[in-house]
Amino acid sequence: MKFLAAHGVEFCCDSRKGPGIAGILNLSPDSFSGDGKMDMESRFAMIQKSGASFVDVGAESTRPGSQPVPEEMEIKMIRDALRFIRSRSDLPVSVDTRKSAVAEMALNEGADIINDVSGLQYDPAMADVIAAHGAGLILMHSRGTPETMQSAEHLQYNNVCEDVSRFFHEQLAYAESRGIRSDHIMLDPGIGFAKTQEQNLELIRYGAAFRKEFQLPVLYGVSRKRFLGELTGQTDPAKRDFATAGVLAYLAVHGGVDFFRVHDPVGMNEMLKLYYILLSENKQEGVKI
């Protein structure tokens, strides 16, 4: 299957050949993993050299309990980052934003994909902006806002996988009614957004089923998230890359996932590369250990 984005960018998504990596470039110092406080230029250089399929740029933290960033500030940070990136690279760029004004600016400045963590629920004009630019859309499941998403109300599901699937059906119909083509959309189950630890695990185990049901690319964003710390006892988000790799290995083994959004694209790409080398049917004869 193909995933199309703005400016003629095209991804051929075939999980049998291995998922791609989206390198996270956080600009907000409020980022839960702490990387937003690090030098943006050196982090982008690392992502660029890692072999990432695209870079995901965000200026507003959406961790549980975070506060919104004023639109003018978000626009300035994203614009500065895009101008820096586009002056040095043609690597595809997704912009993590819920605001249509930010999306409009970003697509005019060379972004290719909008990663809307609200699933087109926050800003009524967002779908029209994406459709007008022929941009790609990462459609993520979430409930509430970052301030409220972990409330008891939003954590109640009849069946989390079925409820997320129903949400995708509804929002895909809405997106298409506003002019966004289905081959411009990839799905994100929203790990950590209005989910308990067990609900996150259920959605991870369900990854291949989403791809089979919708015949659309699927992206998972599990990198360094809180539930990994709860399961491993690791309180420092920056030290959860091994746990992240464990989830990526599981999803790679069971197939059906097209992209992983990660903080450490170098390490995750190396892990996936070795996995698919070992999985290859081209066996060497006579090798002794």
Image (spheres, rainbow, N blue to C red):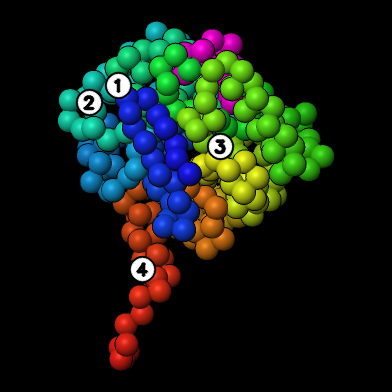
For residue 110, the mark is 1
Kindly indicate the quadrant of the structure image that contains residue 233: bottom right
Where in the figure is residue 269, as x and y percent of width and height?
A: 35, 54
Label 2, on which residue? 86
Number of residues whose C-alpha sits closer than 10 Å to that of mark 2, classed few (under 14), some (14–19) or many (20 or more) = some
Lateral position of residue 80 relative to residue 226, left or right: left
Where in the figure is residue 283, as x and y percent of width and height?
A: 36, 80
Q: Is residue 140 above or below residue 272?
A: above
Magenta-colored span = 118-130
Task: Work out how far the residue at label 1 is from the one at label 3, CA to CA, in angstroms.
Answer: 22 Å
Lateral position of residue 140 relative to residue 163, left or right: left
Mark 1 / mark 4, whichever is N-terminal: 1
Task: Work out how far the residue at label 4 is from the one at label 2, CA to CA, in angstroms.
Answer: 33 Å
Q: Quadrant of the C terminus?
A: bottom left
Task: Work out how far the residue at label 4 is from the one at label 3, CA to CA, in angstroms.
Answer: 27 Å
Query: Contact, CB < 8 Å: mark 2 with mark 1?
Result: yes
Residue furthest to the left: 88
For residue 277, the mark is 4
Specify whether residue 107 is in view.
yes
